[in-house]
């Protein structure tokens, strides 16, 4: 059937620089190397994919996705290529970060998750960690999720109950064309081991940054996605979806930490959908807050507030007070980046009040990292950000940074590094360069031990503030050390 031109495929094909004949030969060659000797793609078929919107049979879409991923240096899925498998509706077939996916069934969510992680692993394996597509606006992500987050629970029978009759067939595998191993169903022991692995990965990320373990987390998530396409008892399925949500957040946070921003955003969105299948709105809200923190870091606070609007109103009273306090600190940071003094102070005041209501309930594993030290650390960051618009906030940033440093325990080295940077930056804004220099050097020493691009970004922000004191010899020396520590100093850091 003539479906009309496939503009998605055509646009990406144009970016590759291939001819139609070259692509046909590559498909046949890749298929043969994976044991698919029957592939016989030719130039006319490639033309029909582009001009008539024909959808090739499996495994050709997966082979094409793998080839485009390698060529373009970013994750390209079969959906990106405009191949709507299994006759999904138009909204069902699109990127989960840009479309209303409320009608997705659990097996569909698992399929998208597994395909995306598979392509991400391929990039990592082949050293092609290049730029990706542009970030999606906050409202574009938040609006489709609003009804579920703010409405009645949709998942009353659980993901397993809704997918009991939908077990993946071998031909629907959503893995890269180079990987044909498929995970199978699991039992309680395996799920408990996966839950433990999440804690291990989370602790490593907090200690050393996201760069060194990101591939392991994505690989584990890929395995879990495959498991989720099989039938499991309802209670076990919910726990498995929770593992998927936790791993997706970690994969997103680690991707953000190493500068893979669009990839990170898609993991955050997938985390929300996994939490949705688990019936866990607080987990979904926290995932949205991570996406919001990413937006603030990238200078897009309006997008962050769009995300926080859904995160806070959606999980609401179901959240523990400490969870709601954490969400308030993210909102306050977004307000601070816009120079809204009253809103920042009010929101941080609400965060402190909510945190004081904590009754000692440890809550879910992902919440246990938000302790009093993290509360002060986020307050320091918000006030330090506000101080660039309102210098009177600088002393508050210093106070909270010191409180955070006093409370930090081993295993939170990256957070301690950020506290040093908040303190040093606030001191520079407050015209206290001598004190700032001490904390700046502690931050600089810690940066060398961290695999985190975000630390470099924050270090650059502090470097910018040192510019007003570059007539001081000690500051000149510090600036030279910072330039030497940054892996690829941008031109803006030139002397």
Image (spheres, helix red, strand yellow):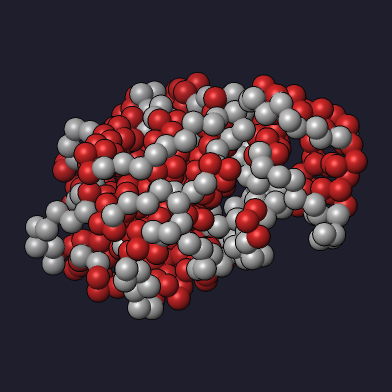
Percent from the top left, x then y, of residue 201? 31, 35
Please indicate whether residue 189 sits to the left or right of residue 465 in the image.
left
Please say if 369 is above or below 285. above
Name the foreground residue: 418 vs 152: 152
Q: Residue at 43% of width from left, 59% of height from top?
A: 165
The part of the image, by quadrant, that contains residue 3 is bottom right
Q: Which residue occupies the extreme right position in the image?
A: 44
Please indicate whether residue 412 sits to the left or right of residue 58 in the image.
left
Name the foreground residue: 369 vs 365: 365
The N terminus lies in which quarter of the figure? bottom right
The part of the image, by quadrant, that contains residue 28 is top right
Percent from the top left, x then y, of residue 140? 57, 65
The C terminus lies in which quarter of the figure? top right
Q: Residue at 53% of width from left, 41% of height from top?
A: 170
Percent from the top left, x then y, of residue 428? 39, 43
Please say if 448 is above or below 184. above
Q: Residue at 85% of width from left, 29% of height from top?
A: 22
């Amino acid at each position: 059937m003539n479906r009309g031109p496939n503009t998605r495929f055509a646009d990406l094909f144009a970016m590759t620089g291939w001819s139609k004949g070259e692509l046909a030969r590559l498909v046949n060659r890749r298929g043969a190397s994976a044991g698919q000797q029957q592939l016989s793609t030719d130039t006319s078929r490639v033309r029909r994919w582009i001009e008539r919107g024909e959808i090739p049979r499996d495994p050709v879409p997966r082979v094409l996705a793998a080839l485009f991923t390698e060529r373009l240096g970013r994750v390209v899925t079969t959906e990106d290529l405009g191949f709507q498998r299994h006759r999904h509706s138009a909204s069902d077939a699109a990127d989960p970060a840009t479309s209303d996916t409320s009608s997705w069934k659990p097996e569909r969510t698992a399929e998208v998750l597994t395909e995306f992680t598979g392509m991400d692993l391929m990039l990592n394996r082949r050293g092609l960690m290049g730029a990706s597509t542009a970030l999606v606006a906050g409202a574009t992500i938040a609006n489709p999720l609003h009804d579920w987050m703010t409405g009645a629970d949709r998942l009353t029978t659980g993901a397993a109950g809704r997918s009991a009759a939908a077990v993946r067939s071998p031909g629907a595998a959503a893995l890269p064309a180079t990987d044909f191993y498929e995970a199978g169903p699991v039992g309680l022991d395996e799920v408990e081991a996966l839950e433990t692995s999440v804690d291990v990965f989370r602790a490593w990320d907090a200690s050393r940054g996201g760069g060194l373990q990101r591939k392991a987390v994505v690989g584990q998530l890929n395995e879990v996605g495959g498991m989720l396409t099989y039938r499991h008892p309802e209670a076990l399925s919910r726990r498995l979806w929770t593992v998927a949500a936790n791993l997706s957040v970690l994969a997103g946070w680690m991707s953000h930490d190493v500068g893979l921003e669009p990839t990170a955003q898609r993991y955050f969105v997938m985390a929300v959908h996994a939490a949705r299948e688990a019936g866990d709105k607080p987990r979904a809200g926290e995932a949205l807050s991570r996406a919001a923190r990413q937006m603030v870091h990238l200078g897009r606070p309006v997008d962050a507030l769009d995300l926080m609007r859904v995160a806070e109103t959606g999980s609401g009273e179901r959240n523990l007070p400490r969870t709601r306090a954490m969400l308030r600190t993210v909102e306050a940071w977004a307000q601070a980046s816009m120079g809204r003094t009253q809103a920042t102070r009010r929101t941080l005041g609400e965060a402190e009040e909510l945190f004081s209501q904590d009754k000692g309930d440890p809550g879910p594993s992902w919440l246990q990292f938000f302790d009093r030290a993290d509360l002060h650390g986020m307050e320091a960051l918000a006030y330090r950000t506000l101080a660039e618009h309102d210098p009177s906030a600088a002393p508050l940033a210093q106070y909270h940074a010191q409180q955070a440093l006093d409370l930090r325990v081993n295993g939170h080295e990256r957070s301690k590094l950020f506290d040093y940077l908040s303190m040093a930056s606030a001191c520079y804004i407050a015209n206290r360069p001598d004190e700032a220099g001490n904390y700046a050097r502690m931050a600089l020493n810690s940066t060398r031990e961290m695999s985190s691009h975000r630390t470099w970004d924050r270090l650059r922000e502090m470097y910018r503030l040192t510019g007003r004191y570059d007539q001081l010899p000690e500051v000149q020396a510090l600036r030279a050390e910072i330039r030497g520590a940054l892996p690829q100093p941008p031109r803006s850091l030139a002397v």
